[in-house]
Image: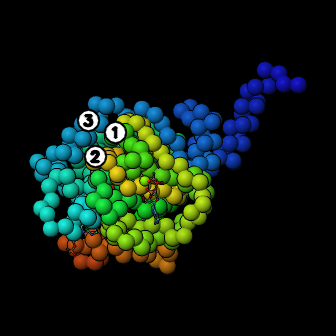
């Protein structure tokens, strides 16, 4: 018979067991057992209303200043949608589809250090945390060629560091996102698989630079559209297959995100793996951007951009 005096023993056994059975998250006081199990099984977890309107307003303002070129940010990559980059019209601020690598912009980088975000991140990375990759995505109204889509992919394809289970993305909606404006689409449970081969999808209207898609995923796998309100944040595993649909509205769908990794993750050599194709593209772009010879390594491009946000810097 169960007796309350046995409760501490039962709890302790559960904790021990959970270390064996739950490989994707850590035991702490933040996630409920149900939330942990959800992440373990699905590879993502959505937390409502995590980032304040005030913070989002300040990211939006800074984004606009960058578009107007009132501030210059070292290392920042300003992307334009393919449909606009290849058009004859002079691009104005509305042409910016994505900012990458805003680690040197104090206003935007504030996002990566928000304590309420880091508390969740720690459940997946542990206490020593590096912000490895930053983005502000401004998905434009589709110009008619479906170039606003992001093909289904696994973010780990871009990362030469491991282990995958100690990496997590936080992605915060800066406004209401839904099917109409191209919310995230995820294939729940795919984080338990392996890294798949990625390449450019054969889309008629073309595809944006470096938007590789996963080859041959099961089109019948259940899809979940993550409709979110402003401030809602999803945390997801780097093997989770995800993408985003076309923006069929006239507004620019904004989201801000950061990929975090445990500071004791280690770099790997991707030679001879499916990641060789992205390594080559990244090195070609980096060589141009930093006006260097082609001796900048894939690993360097990451070590150089990564920033410690909690604990101590170890091997990344
Ligand atoms: C987990 C995470 C990492 C997952 C992801 O983020 S997946 C997406 C990752 N994407 C990236 O990292 C994209 C990086 N993009 C860039 O570095 C830049 O936007 C560049 C593609 C190098 C272009 O930048 P920049 O050289 O300043 O732009 P320019 O206007 O001078 O154009 C130079 C040539 O590039 C072309 N271009 C610009 N934007 C795109 C585009 N979106 N897709 C395809 N081609 C593009 C542009 O047309 C021009 O081509 P040519 O006229 O020389 O043929
Ligand atoms: N031909 C394709 N190959 C690979 N991925 C695709 C293809 N077409 C769409 N996708 C991806 O599938 C996801 C959903 O795209 P899409 O907008 O077509 O459908 P949806 O949003 O589920 O449906 P709806 O637009 O009817 O609401 C996106 O990640 C998109 O990039
Ligand atoms: O905001 C989006 O459309 C998703 C972007 C994404 O998955 C990525 O850049 O890796
Ligand atoms: Fe992604
Ligand atoms: Mg759609």
Q: What residue is pinned by disc 1?
A: 175
User: From mark 3 to mark 2, how far is it between C-alphas?
Assistant: 16 Å
Q: Residue at x 31, y 31 (%)?
A: 53
Q: What residue occupies the far top of the structure in this picture?
A: 4
Q: Nearer the viewer, residue 307 or 124?
A: 124
Horizontal relation, residue 284 to residue 7: left or right: left
Question: Which circle, 1 or 3, is nearer the viewer?
Answer: 1
Q: What residue is pinned by disc 3?
A: 57
Horizontal relation, residue 136 to residue 232: left or right: left
Question: Which circle, 3 or 2, is nearer the viewer?
Answer: 2
* Earlier residue among tags 1 and 2: 1
Q: Position of residue 49 (x, y in %)?
A: 42, 32
Horizontal relation, residue 105 to residue 168: left or right: left
Disc 3 vs disc 2: Cβ atoms closer than 8 Å?
no
- Helix, strand or loop status at disc 2: loop
* Earlier residue among tags 3 and 2: 3
- Where is residue 299, by image quadrant? bottom left
Q: Nearer the viewer, residue 307 or 210?
A: 210
Q: What residue is pinned by disc 2?
A: 251
- Helix, strand or loop status at disc 3: helix
Q: Position of residue 304 (x, y in %)?
A: 31, 60
Q: Nearer the viewer, residue 137 or 81?
A: 81
């Amino acid at each position: 018979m169960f007796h309350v005096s046995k409760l501490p023993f039962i709890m302790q056994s559960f904790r021990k067991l959970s270390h064996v059975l739950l490989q994707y998250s850590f035991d702490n006081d933040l996630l409920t057992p149900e939330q942990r199990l959800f992440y373990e099984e699905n590879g993502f977890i959505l937390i409502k209303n995590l980032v304040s309107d005030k913070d989002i307003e300040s990211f939006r303002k800074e984004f606009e200043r960058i578009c107007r070129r009132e501030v210059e940010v070292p290392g920042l990559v300003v992307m334009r949608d393919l449909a606009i980059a290849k058009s004859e019209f002079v691009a104005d601020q509305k042409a910016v589809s994505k900012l990458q690598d805003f680690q040197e912009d104090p206003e935007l980088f504030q996002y990566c250090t928000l304590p309420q975000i880091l508390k969740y991140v720690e459940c997946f990375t542990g206490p020593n945390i590096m912000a490895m990759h930053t983005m502000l995505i401004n998905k434009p109204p589709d110009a008619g060629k479906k170039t606003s889509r992001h093909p289904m992919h696994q973010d780990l394809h871009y990362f030469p560091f491991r282990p995958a289970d100690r990496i997590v993305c936080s992605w915060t909606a800066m406004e209401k996102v839904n099917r109409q404006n191209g919310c995230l689409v995820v294939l729940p449970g795919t984080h338990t698989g392996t890294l798949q081969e990625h390449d450019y999808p054969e889309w008629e209207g073309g595809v944006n630079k470096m938007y590789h898609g996963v080859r041959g995923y099961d089109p019948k796998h259940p899809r979940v559209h993550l409709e979110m309100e402003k401030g809602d944040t999803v945390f997801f595993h780097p093997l989770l297959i995800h993408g985003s649909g076309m923006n069929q509205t006239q507004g620019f769908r904004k989201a801000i995100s950061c990929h975090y990794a445990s500071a004791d993750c280690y770099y790997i050599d991707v030679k001879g793996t499916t990641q060789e194709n992205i390594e080559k593209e990244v090195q070609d772009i980096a060589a141009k951007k930093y006006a260097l010879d082609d001796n900048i390594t894939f690993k360097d491009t990451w070590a150089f951009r990564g920033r410690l946000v909690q604990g101590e810097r170890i091997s990344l």
